[in-house]
Image (cartoon, rainbow, N blue to C red):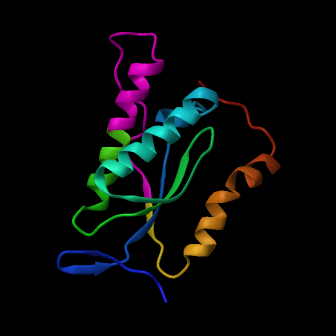
Amino acid sequence: MTEYQSLSHVKWECKYHVIWCPKYRRKRLYGKIRRRLGEIIHELCRQKGIELIEGHAQRDHVHSCLGIPPKYSVSSVIGFLKGKSAIRLHQEFSRAKNSGKHFWIRGYFVSTVGRNEKIIRAYIRHQEFSDKRQPNLPEFE
Protein backbone atom coordinates (compact mmCIF):
# COMPACT_ATOMS: atom_id res chain seq x y z
CA MET A 1 0.00 0.00 0.00
CA THR A 2 1.28 3.43 -0.92
CA GLU A 3 1.90 6.01 1.77
CA TYR A 4 -0.17 9.03 0.84
CA GLN A 5 0.75 12.59 1.79
CA SER A 6 -1.85 14.75 3.45
CA LEU A 7 -2.75 18.38 3.84
CA SER A 8 -5.60 19.72 5.97
CA HIS A 9 -8.41 18.53 3.66
CA VAL A 10 -6.80 16.18 1.18
CA LYS A 11 -4.80 12.97 0.89
CA TRP A 12 -2.65 12.92 -2.21
CA GLU A 13 0.01 11.25 -4.30
CA CYS A 14 1.05 13.54 -7.16
CA LYS A 15 4.36 12.52 -8.69
CA TYR A 16 5.80 13.89 -11.91
CA HIS A 17 8.77 13.06 -14.14
CA VAL A 18 10.20 16.40 -15.28
CA ILE A 19 13.01 17.16 -17.75
CA TRP A 20 14.44 20.58 -18.56
CA CYS A 21 17.51 21.78 -20.47
CA PRO A 22 20.00 24.67 -20.53
CA LYS A 23 19.53 27.31 -23.20
CA TYR A 24 20.53 26.06 -26.67
CA ARG A 25 21.06 22.61 -25.10
CA ARG A 26 24.63 23.62 -24.28
CA LYS A 27 26.61 21.16 -22.20
CA ARG A 28 26.97 23.38 -19.12
CA LEU A 29 26.06 21.06 -16.26
CA TYR A 30 29.33 19.57 -15.05
CA GLY A 31 31.79 19.91 -12.17
CA LYS A 32 31.07 22.63 -9.62
CA ILE A 33 27.98 23.87 -11.45
CA ARG A 34 26.42 20.38 -11.43
CA ARG A 35 27.08 19.87 -7.71
CA ARG A 36 25.83 23.34 -6.82
CA LEU A 37 22.72 22.89 -8.97
CA GLY A 38 21.86 19.76 -6.97
CA GLU A 39 22.21 21.67 -3.69
CA ILE A 40 20.11 24.56 -5.00
CA ILE A 41 17.30 22.27 -6.25
CA HIS A 42 17.23 20.40 -2.91
CA GLU A 43 17.02 23.70 -1.03
CA LEU A 44 14.28 25.13 -3.27
CA CYS A 45 12.21 21.94 -2.98
CA ARG A 46 12.49 22.07 0.81
CA GLN A 47 11.27 25.69 0.79
CA LYS A 48 8.04 24.78 -1.01
CA GLY A 49 7.44 21.39 0.60
CA ILE A 50 8.11 19.54 -2.66
CA GLU A 51 9.49 16.04 -2.41
CA LEU A 52 12.53 15.48 -4.63
CA ILE A 53 12.15 11.72 -5.08
CA GLU A 54 14.95 11.28 -7.63
CA GLY A 55 17.09 13.70 -9.58
CA HIS A 56 20.05 13.60 -11.90
CA ALA A 57 21.80 16.27 -13.95
CA GLN A 58 23.33 15.31 -17.28
CA ARG A 59 25.65 17.70 -19.13
CA ASP A 60 22.78 19.04 -21.23
CA HIS A 61 19.58 18.30 -19.29
CA VAL A 62 18.12 17.60 -15.85
CA HIS A 63 15.86 14.66 -14.96
CA SER A 64 13.82 14.75 -11.78
CA CYS A 65 10.96 12.92 -10.16
CA LEU A 66 9.01 15.34 -7.98
CA GLY A 67 6.16 14.91 -5.50
CA ILE A 68 4.26 18.18 -5.89
CA PRO A 69 1.44 19.01 -3.45
CA PRO A 70 -1.91 19.67 -5.16
CA LYS A 71 -1.95 23.25 -3.86
CA TYR A 72 0.75 24.07 -6.47
CA SER A 73 0.47 23.79 -10.24
CA VAL A 74 3.24 21.91 -12.03
CA SER A 75 4.01 24.95 -14.19
CA SER A 76 4.43 27.25 -11.18
CA VAL A 77 6.76 24.78 -9.45
CA ILE A 78 8.93 24.28 -12.54
CA GLY A 79 8.99 28.04 -13.15
CA PHE A 80 10.08 28.57 -9.53
CA LEU A 81 12.82 25.90 -9.70
CA LYS A 82 14.18 27.06 -13.07
CA GLY A 83 13.97 30.77 -12.25
CA LYS A 84 15.54 30.68 -8.80
CA SER A 85 18.24 28.20 -9.81
CA ALA A 86 19.18 30.35 -12.84
CA ILE A 87 19.52 33.45 -10.65
CA ARG A 88 21.67 31.65 -8.08
CA LEU A 89 23.89 30.01 -10.68
CA HIS A 90 24.33 33.37 -12.40
CA GLN A 91 25.29 35.06 -9.11
CA GLU A 92 27.82 32.38 -8.23
CA PHE A 93 29.38 31.42 -11.58
CA SER A 94 28.90 34.22 -14.10
CA ARG A 95 31.83 36.50 -14.88
CA ALA A 96 29.69 38.99 -16.79
CA LYS A 97 27.88 41.44 -14.52
CA ASN A 98 25.20 42.68 -16.90
CA SER A 99 24.54 39.60 -18.99
CA GLY A 100 21.04 38.15 -18.79
CA LYS A 101 20.13 35.43 -16.36
CA HIS A 102 18.84 33.19 -19.16
CA PHE A 103 20.21 29.79 -18.25
CA TRP A 104 17.30 27.43 -19.04
CA ILE A 105 15.15 27.01 -22.16
CA ARG A 106 11.57 28.23 -21.85
CA GLY A 107 9.93 24.82 -22.02
CA TYR A 108 10.14 21.53 -20.18
CA PHE A 109 8.80 17.99 -20.40
CA VAL A 110 6.47 16.63 -17.73
CA SER A 111 4.74 13.29 -17.34
CA THR A 112 2.70 11.89 -14.50
CA VAL A 113 4.35 8.97 -12.78
CA GLY A 114 1.37 6.96 -11.61
CA ARG A 115 2.18 3.40 -10.64
CA ASN A 116 5.39 3.26 -12.70
CA GLU A 117 7.46 5.04 -10.05
CA LYS A 118 10.09 2.29 -9.68
CA ILE A 119 10.65 2.12 -13.43
CA ILE A 120 10.97 5.90 -13.79
CA ARG A 121 13.30 6.19 -10.78
CA ALA A 122 15.55 3.48 -12.24
CA TYR A 123 15.48 5.24 -15.62
CA ILE A 124 16.55 8.55 -14.04
CA ARG A 125 19.25 6.86 -11.96
CA HIS A 126 20.78 5.02 -14.93
CA GLN A 127 20.34 7.72 -17.59
CA GLU A 128 23.98 8.82 -17.41
CA PHE A 129 25.26 5.32 -18.13
CA SER A 130 23.05 4.95 -21.19
CA ASP A 131 24.22 8.35 -22.48
CA LYS A 132 27.87 7.30 -22.14
CA ARG A 133 27.27 4.33 -24.45
CA GLN A 134 26.28 6.65 -27.30
CA PRO A 135 29.08 8.06 -29.44
CA ASN A 136 30.23 11.56 -28.52
CA LEU A 137 28.62 14.09 -30.78
CA PRO A 138 30.21 17.50 -31.36
CA GLU A 139 28.85 20.40 -29.36
CA PHE A 140 27.75 23.32 -31.52
CA GLU A 141 28.06 26.85 -30.21
Magenta region? 84-109
Instruction: Return the residue found at the far bottom.
Output: 1
Identified at 51% across, 56% down, the residue is 64
Whether residue 44 is situated above or below residue 2 in the rendered picture: above
Q: Does residue 6 appear to the left or right of 17 in the view shown?
A: left
Picture coordinates of residue 70 (x, y %)? 26, 69
Picture coordinates of residue 22 (x, y %)? 49, 37
Q: Is 91 covered by the magenta stretch?
A: yes
Whether residue 92 is situated above or below residue 124 in the rendered picture: above
Q: Does residue 130 appear to the left or right of 115 in the view shown?
A: right
Tell me the quarter of the image containing the C terminus.
top right
Picture coordinates of residue 52 (x, y %)? 46, 57
Nearer-the-camera pick, 44 or 124: 44
Nearer-the-camera pick, 92 or 18: 92
Q: Does residue 118 appear to the left or right of 114 in the view shown?
A: right
Identified at 45% across, 46% down, the residue is 42
Identified at 39% across, 36% down, the residue is 85
Picture coordinates of residue 84 (x, y %)? 33, 36
Nearer-the-camera pick, 52 or 25: 52
Q: Is 37 covered by the magenta stretch?
A: no
Q: Does residue 131 appear to the left or right of 29 in the view shown?
A: right
